[in-house]
Image: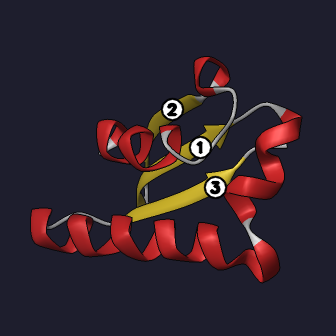
Amino acid sequence: MKNFVEYLLVRLIDHPDELQVTEQETAEGLLIQITVNPEDMGRVIGKGGKVIKSVRKLVQVKAARDGIRVRVEVAE
């Protein structure tokens, strides 16, 4: 799942070398945390949160196919 999120985001941001995606197992399922350069934060979140909502939806669809629960967070 980590590779999928990286694949989606690396094409959106100006500083792909500073993209960090981490996975953690939690009681609720998999937690994916995204850390980007502060200059790229607006691109990842998008106007009105549209971009991050779309990323979350794509991850949820892939997770449903894999039979797991996933939560995506953007670290500040």
In space, the residues marked 2 and 1 are separated at their CA atoms by 5 Å
Residue lying at 69% horizontally and 34% vertically, measured from the top left:
14
Q: How crowded is mark 3: few (under 14 residues within 10 Å), some or many (20 or more)?
A: few
The answer to whether marks 3 and 1 mark residues whose Cβ atoms lie closer than 8 Å is yes
Q: Tag 1's secondary structure?
A: strand
Q: Mark 2 points at which residue?
A: 22
Q: In which quarter of the image is residue 69?
A: bottom left
Q: Name the residue under label 1.
A: 33
Q: Where is residue 63 in the image (x, y as percent from the top left)?
A: 24, 65
- The residue depicted at 68 percent of the width and 55 percent of the height is 44
State the SS at label 3: strand
Q: How far apart are marks 3 and 1 (CA)?
A: 5 Å
* Residue at screen point 49% across, 43% down: 11
Amino acid at pointer 2: Thr
- The residue positioned 85% from the left and 43% from the top of the image is 76
Amino acid type, callout 1: Gln
List x then y, in percent, for residue 1: 29, 46
Q: Name the residue beneath numbered marker 3.
A: 73
Dot 2, crowdedness within 10 Å: few (<14), some or many (≥20)?
some
Relative image position of residue 52 (x, y in whole percent):
61, 67
Could you say which quadrant of the image residue 2 lies in? top left
Residue 65 is left or right of residue 6, and the answer is left
Label 1 crowd (10 A; few <14 / some 14-19 / many >=20): some
Cβ atoms at labels 2 and 1 below 8 Å apart: yes
* 53 and 68: which is toward the camera: 53
The image quadrant that residue 66 belongs to is bottom left
Mark closer to the chain start, 3 or 1: 1
Give the percent coordinates (x, y) of residue 57.
42, 77
